Image: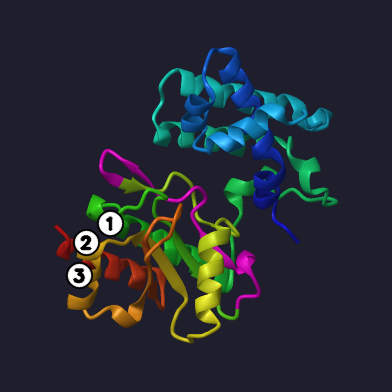
Amino acid sequence: MIPPCMEINRKVLPEVRRRAALILKERGYGQNEIAEGLQVTQAMVSKYMKAKPKRMGEEMEDSVESMARELAEGIISGKGRAELIESFCGSCFRMRESGSFCSVHNVKDCRVCMNIRGIQEAGDRADAIRDVESAIPMLEGINPGLIPEVRVNIARAIENPQGINDVVAIPGRMVEIKGRLRALTRPEFGASRHLSGKLLRVMSEREDVFAVINILFNEEIGTAIELAGLKDEVIIDRGDFGREPCVYVLGRSATEAASRVMLLSEMVG
């Protein structure tokens, strides 16, 4: 079953961004300015402008409109990316707890969103969450030169994962605030399709890997990897057109991967 957070990402957030784009257009913003504010491409903004309004249903309509206006007003007022993410995530949590989004995934007697802050995972899943939570403060002070444009995330799987819903990560990734990384939301299962998918592919080939952290790749970091003897503990993606070069730092645990990132941080400029 697809978890509520992924259903919201797939069905709700595109409509929120579309409505926010229209509000910004009404305020005189050009497509390039809207794209920059929403952190999407200009082509996506053009698509928003041509798209037909999506009917969200009576229960969700007010919530979606409120989130769109809050997002647009935040951009207009000049809020930074970190402030926008914090505000937007806060709104999303409040809407989920109110039950406004229950119709999105249509599961009978589901109260996950209403109890989201009190949910307690058990066993291996609880261990995975605690592992990521322990790794977060380790990364907060790393050299900013290791932080990619796509930002940093941590993915940690339970033993014998069946899919991305068995991998915990940070929703929205860690963001840079005044030169330091911060996780603005608590780790969740199924929160990062890209990094979780990468981890699962690695785990299908290696039995000693349960966690991965993405950082920037450049020649200086590549040299540090060699000097630190970590060539077998990382996967280097040199990037391509439209894809930023990055390093996937591996570990048996999130804290082990984080310790390797910290070592590289100390060795880089």
Q: What is the crowding at mark 1: few (fewer than 14 residues within 10 Å), some, or many (at least 20)?
A: many
Amino acid on which disc 1 is placed = Leu
Identify the magenta region. 161-180
Mark 1 or 3, nearer chain start: 1
Between 182 and 246, the one nearer to me in the picture: 246
Asked if residue 143 lies in the magenta stretch, the reply is: no
Separation of disc 2 and disc 3 at Cα? 9 Å
Q: Which mark is residue 265?
A: 2
Badge 1 is on which residue?
146
Nearest to the observer: residue 87 or residue 12: 12
Q: Report the residue marked by disc 3.
A: 224
In the rendered structure, which amino acid carries the disc numbered 3? Ala
Check disc 3 and report its element: helix, strand or loop: helix
- Which percent across, then down, holds residue 45? 59, 32
Q: Where 200 sits versus 71, above or below?
A: below
Q: Quadrant of residue 16?
A: top right
